[in-house]
Image: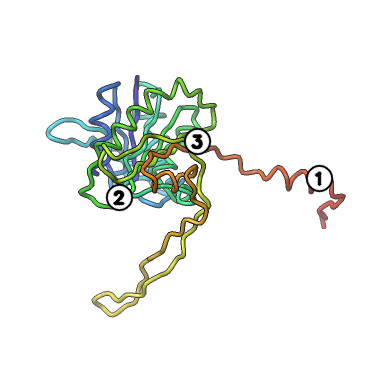
């Protein structure tokens, strides 16, 4: 199995290192990842400046390519130009912090997997609920490996990716894996005003996350109950019900 690994936390993050270490047990791992932190960039692409990919070494060995772009850039550039072999699967992560509910719209981790999905390649996004840089990523990496091995049996259709979230609890306390839907949650955004050494004001986002609809069959709910959450995601943006109603309404938009 040829596996492309990427992330949004940067090629030097502990999450991607743990993921690569575990996935090398089941296949040939290729790494193309941002050269710096790219969290919450969504599905942004670099179009107004050149992309550069340089070899990144870890412990004296070639680890992968570091790209001065976004997670989606890494997938597109990696598959189209950097890699000699088209990957059988793309795994993005392991992200620091959950990517549940509405967070998938902002997540560079999920967007990297989305880009692979759009290119016709099976894809998984993997996140751990902890934001701590020192968090133990080994359990999340193990679950990612298990899911990657089982994807062929799941018969995931084209145009769908798997979004995986792992609770930050000891492995022996994880109750299992559960297929879930996205919860209906939201952020209450606040911006804290601060001042730099020159007394110029700036703002730092400081939001509060509210899980509104988070029963045990949602991603947030499953995590709260001690389960790994696996959510199939696809992006059909058309509201078919509204489209049908408008077509049958007799209302025709004016051309003048």
Residue topped by disc 1: 247
Quarter that holds the C terminus: bottom right
- Give the mark, 2 or 1, whose residue is nearer the N terminus: 2
- Give the mark, 3 or 2, whose residue is nearer the N terminus: 2
Q: Position of residue 70 (x, y in %)?
A: 38, 45
Q: Position of residue 134 (x, y in %)?
A: 20, 48
Q: Which of the numbered marks, if any, corresponds to residue 237? A: none
Q: CA distance from mark 3 to mark 1?
A: 30 Å
Does residue 78 appear to the left or right of 179 in the view shown? left
- Give the mark, 3 or 1, whose residue is nearer the N terminus: 3
Tell me: residue 184, above or below residue 66: below
Residue topped by disc 3: 232
Question: For the view shown, which residue lies furthest in the bottom direction?
Answer: 199
In the rendered image, is residue 47 in sight? Answer: no
Quarter that holds the N terminus: top left
Between 222 and 111, the residue placed more toward the observer is 222
Circle 3 or circle 1, nearest the eye? 3
Element at badge 3?
A: strand
In the rendered image, is residue 231 in sight? Answer: yes
How busy is the neighbourhood of tag 3: few (under 14 within 10 Å), some, or many (20 plus)?
Answer: some
Q: Quarter of the image holding residue 149?
A: top left
Number of numbered tags placed on the structure image? 3
- Do residues under tags 2 and 1 come within 8 Å of each other at their CB atoms? no
Question: For the view shown, which residue lies furthest in the right direction?
Answer: 250
Q: Which of the numbered marks, if any, corresponds to residue 130? A: 2
- Residue found at x 37% / y 39%: 126
Q: Position of residue 245 (x, y in %)?
A: 79, 47
Circle 2 or circle 1, nearest the eye? 2
Q: CA distance from mark 2 to mark 1?
A: 47 Å
């Amino acid at each position: 199995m040829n596996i492309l690994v990427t992330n949004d936390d940067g090629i030097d993050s502990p999450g991607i290192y743990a993921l690569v270490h575990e996935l090398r047990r089941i296949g040939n791992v290729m790494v193309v990842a941002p050269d710096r932190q790219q969290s919450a960039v969504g599905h942004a692409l670099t179009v107004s400046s050149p992309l550069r990919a340089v070899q990144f070494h870890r412990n004296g060995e070639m680890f992968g390519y570091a790209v001065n772009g976004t997670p989606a850039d890494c997938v597109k550039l990696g598959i189209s130009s950097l890699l000699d072999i088209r990957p059988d699967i793309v795994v993005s992560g392991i992200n620091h912090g959950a990517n549940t509910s509405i967070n998938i719209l902002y997540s560079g981790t999920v967007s990297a997997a989305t880009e692979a999905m759009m290119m016709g390649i099976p894809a998984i996004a993997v996140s751990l609920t902890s934001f701590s840089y020192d968090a133990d990523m080994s359990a999340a990496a193990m679950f990612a490996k298990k899911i990657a091995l089982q994807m062929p049996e799941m018969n995931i259709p084209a145009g769908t990716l798997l979004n995986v979230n792992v609770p930050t609890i000891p492995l022996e306390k994880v109750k299992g894996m559960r297929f879930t839907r996205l919860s209906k949650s939201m952020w209450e955004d606040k911006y804290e005003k601060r001042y730099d050494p020159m007394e110029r004001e700036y703002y730092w986002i400081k939001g509060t996350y509210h899980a509104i609809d988070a029963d045990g069959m949602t991603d947030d709910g499953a995590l709260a109950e001690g389960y790994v959450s696996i959510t199939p995601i696809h992006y059909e943006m058309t509201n078919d019900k509204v489209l049908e109603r408008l077509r049958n309404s007799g209302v025709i938009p004016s051309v003048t």
